[in-house]
């Protein structure tokens, strides 16, 4: 008889009564308003906040009606309940399960329950019993991102000691300059070192987006404006994030017209249901070779 079979019956019974792990969800933010901006905050925007309203009847008592979603919190905390009563949740703190929506929802629950002035430092692995964001927040309200130059929103009106100021300065120095491009949802200009990029979370499923870009690339229409070269794509939360390298001296405003034109081309290509031809299949293979999965 194997070792597993010799474990005490009570231990085996306890394990069988535990909730099953959360199932993997390829598009955890699907069904939320502005799904692409949730993915952008999760993966490509360094310093940003957005406010969500808690759905009516989810919490009782003195629970706050709103929660601030942040890209990152100090020490990568999943959540923070400020002395003022404000609740913040960081969504770049890592995965605890196969469903990011449940992980963030768990952080919201723990941060609301935390004593004012206390952070949430860890998350348990989410289970099938853990609610999802779609269960906790009001999905009738738009999700609007506010970009920040750095992480001063961490401290609000608090006074920092010398160590705290040094930590904040280091975080601010690491923030990648990022600007929203208004011509398309979830398109962002950023400068990393001496190189400049446009990164854009597309709203279609991964395969539809890849096919659309393959059609454009095969037709010689994948450049962004004058010389913006499609480098490849990130995959995250079930969506595709193409990355163009653009003129290093450019600014975000230089790409409003180019992104608007590319948006029209991508939407048309995404709606094309014809099978890919040989050239497009070759372009798709090249794109797949240059795709990187985030988390």
Image: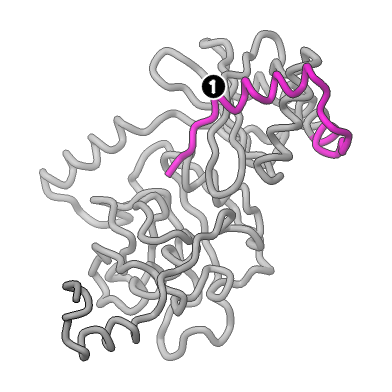
In this rendering, position of residue 281 left or right of residue 53 = right
Query: Is residue 151 shown above or below 103?
Result: above
Task: Say which quadrant the N terminus sits in.
Answer: bottom left
- Say which residue appears at 18% left-offset and 43% top-offset: 165
Front one among 94 and 7: 7
Badge 1 marks a residue whose secondary structure is strand
Number of numbered markers: 1
Question: In the image, 242: left or right of 221?
Answer: left
Of residues 134 and 51, which is closer to you in this image?
Answer: 134
Quarter-of-image position of residue 86? bottom left
Q: Which residue is mark 1?
A: 197
At 61% from the left and 29% from the top, the residue drawn is 242
- Where in the figure is residue 230, as x and y percent of width and height? 62, 19
- At x 47% / y 85%, what residue is drawn? 59
Residue 267 spot, x, y in % from top left: 81, 36
Seen from the viewer's position, the closer of residues 15 and 47 is: 15
Magenta highlight on residue 279: yes
Residue situated in front as seen by the camera: 73 or 127: 127
Relative to 185, is 266 on the left or the right? right
**Residue extent of the magenta highlight:** 267-295
141 with respect to 193 (left or right) = right
Magenta includes 257? no
């Amino acid at each position: 008889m194997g070792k597993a079979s010799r474990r005490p019956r009570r231990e085996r019974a306890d394990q069988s009564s535990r909730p099953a792990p959360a199932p993997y969800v390829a598009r955890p933010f699907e069904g939320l308003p502005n799904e692409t901006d949730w993915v952008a905050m999760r993966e490509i925007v360094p310093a940003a906040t957005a406010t969500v309203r808690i759905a009516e009847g989810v919490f009782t008592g003195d629970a706050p009606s709103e929660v601030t979603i942040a890209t990152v919190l100090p020490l990568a905390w999943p959540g923070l309940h400020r002395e003022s009563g404000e609740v913040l949740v960081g969504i770049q703190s890592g995965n605890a399960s196969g469903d990011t929506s449940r992980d963030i929802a768990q952080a919201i629950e723990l941060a609301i329950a935390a004593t004012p002035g206390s952070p949430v430092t860890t998350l348990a692995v989410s289970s099938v019993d853990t609610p999802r964001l779609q269960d906790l927040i009001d999905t009738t309200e738009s999700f609007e991102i506010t970009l920040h130059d750095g992480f001063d929103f961490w401290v609000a009106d608090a006074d920092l000691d010398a160590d705290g100021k040094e930590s904040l300065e280091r975080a601010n120095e690491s923030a990648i300059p990022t600007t929203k491009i208004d011509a398309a949802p979830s398109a962002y200009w950023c400068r990393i070192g001496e190189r400049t990029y446009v990164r854009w979370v597309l709203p279609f499923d991964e395969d539809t987006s890849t096919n659309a870009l393959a059609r454009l690339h095969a037709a010689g229409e994948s450049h962004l404006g004058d010389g913006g070269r499609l480098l490849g794509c990130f995959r995250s939360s079930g969506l595709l994030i193409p990355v163009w390298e653009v003129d290093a001296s450019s600014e975000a405003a230089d790409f409003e017209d180019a992104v608007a034109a590319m948006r029209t081309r991508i939407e048309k290509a995404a709606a094309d249901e014809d099978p890919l031809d040989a050239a497009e299949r070759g372009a798709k293979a090249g794109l797949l070779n240059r795709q990187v999965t985030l988390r």
